[in-house]
Amino acid sequence: MTDFRSDTVTRPTAAMRTAIATAEVGDDVFADDPTINRLQASAAQMLGFEDALFASSGTQTNLLALLSHCERGDEAIVGQQWHTYKWEAGGMAVLGSIQPQPLEHAPDGTIPLASIEAAIKPDDPHFAITRLVVMENTTGGKVLPMDYLREMRALATSRGLATHLDGARLFNAAVEVTRRRRAGIREGAGPDSAAAARAREGDVPLEPRAVAREICANFDSVSVCLSKGLGAPVGSLLLGSKPLIARARRWRKMLGGGMRQAGMIAAGGLHALENHIERLADDHANATRLAEGLIALGHQYGGLQADLPQTNIVFVKVDDAIAQAFADHLAAHGVRTTGSVGRYGSGLVQRWVTHLDVTHHDVEAALVIAAGFFEARR
């Protein structure tokens, strides 16, 4: 069985299991678990922050960031499809009394800067106080352009707003930006552009960790998931200034998120940061091959539409006439995906996600199974 439902389904590698089994532990509520402390310090240094906090999930680290940036009655500008707004059970409003101001995305996943500026409330007692701009990168598998992030940061700073990044797949974004730069392509420019020349001359980072740090420089706080593409079994990190992380630690305790000998799970995250970043390029290549194969089936037989992915997520529009039968066929042959009407857009859309446990062979086998569905209908 090949599980394309999400990159959250990865299982620890043998080396990661060894790291987990041999982890040195303490009591993290007393801040003396050495493995957690090492994970937090390593991530903060890698990404250019003063401090970091380990928590059980990305939903929790995002909520901790929102609670630490905003007070009751404050407002956070978010995207309509951002995880922080749509997929986290309304936590900012329910638990923080924070008003979300959702905005629509452009096709490339960005929120137009003019829309952000127009949404910032004036200083008037009728309105919530706009405090925070939230981004998500990647979003739907798309990488937010670096120039856009810098412009967003400049706008937020000019209006006195803080910025937070839901970087659940931050390193997927960094690996893809690195690939483009190494190929001489920057911000959509051709290989002969001045921007590409600067990349070749070393004016911009050409290594995923350095690129991730460059992305993070546009934010006051960043949430990074360790249990998606990086392949750890549990956990996420919140990174920020020492005062912000101190507030977040207090909120984590209040939410019941203080863990004791959690170094055993932090060890998996530490191993992932040290060993699993560069290999994300394999997931991206597998997703591209998967999309190419599904696009070819759509051209040959009809009924499927897909776009080439930027990272590891492939969305496939399936005609209503075959949608259920196609999903049943895949499931019967051990290929698992997610998908529903209206979840990712209009009509039935399947989401296929490549990850640590999906090989090139798995992709080719899944394409054969998908082709078998159409062959049987001829």
Image: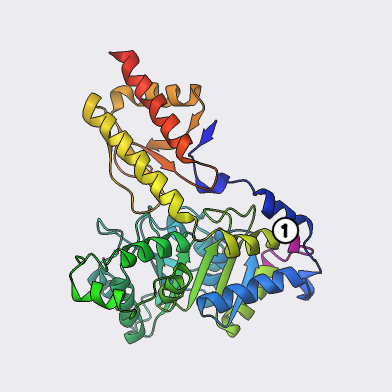
Magenta segment:
254-265
**Quarter location, residue 348:** top left
Asked if residue 272 lies in the magenta stretch, the reply is: no
**In the picture provided, is 290 more to the left or to the right than 73?**
left
**Rendered image coloring scheme:** rainbow
Q: Position of residue 281 (x, y in %)?
A: 43, 55
Q: Give the residue at mark 1.
A: 19
Question: Residue 71, can we see it?
Answer: no
- Residue 73 lies, with reference to residue 290, above or below; the image says below
Give the prevailing secondary structure in the magenta stretch.
loop
**In the picture provided, is 129 more to the left or to the right than 299?**
right
**Residue at x 32%, y 86% (from the top left corner):** 158
Viewer-closest of 363 and 83: 363
Q: How many marks?
A: 1
Viewer-closest of 85 and 329: 329
Given the image, on which type of amino acid does mark 1 rest? Ala
**In the picture provided, is 217 more to the left or to the right than 31?**
left
Q: Position of residue 330 (x, y in %)?
A: 44, 26
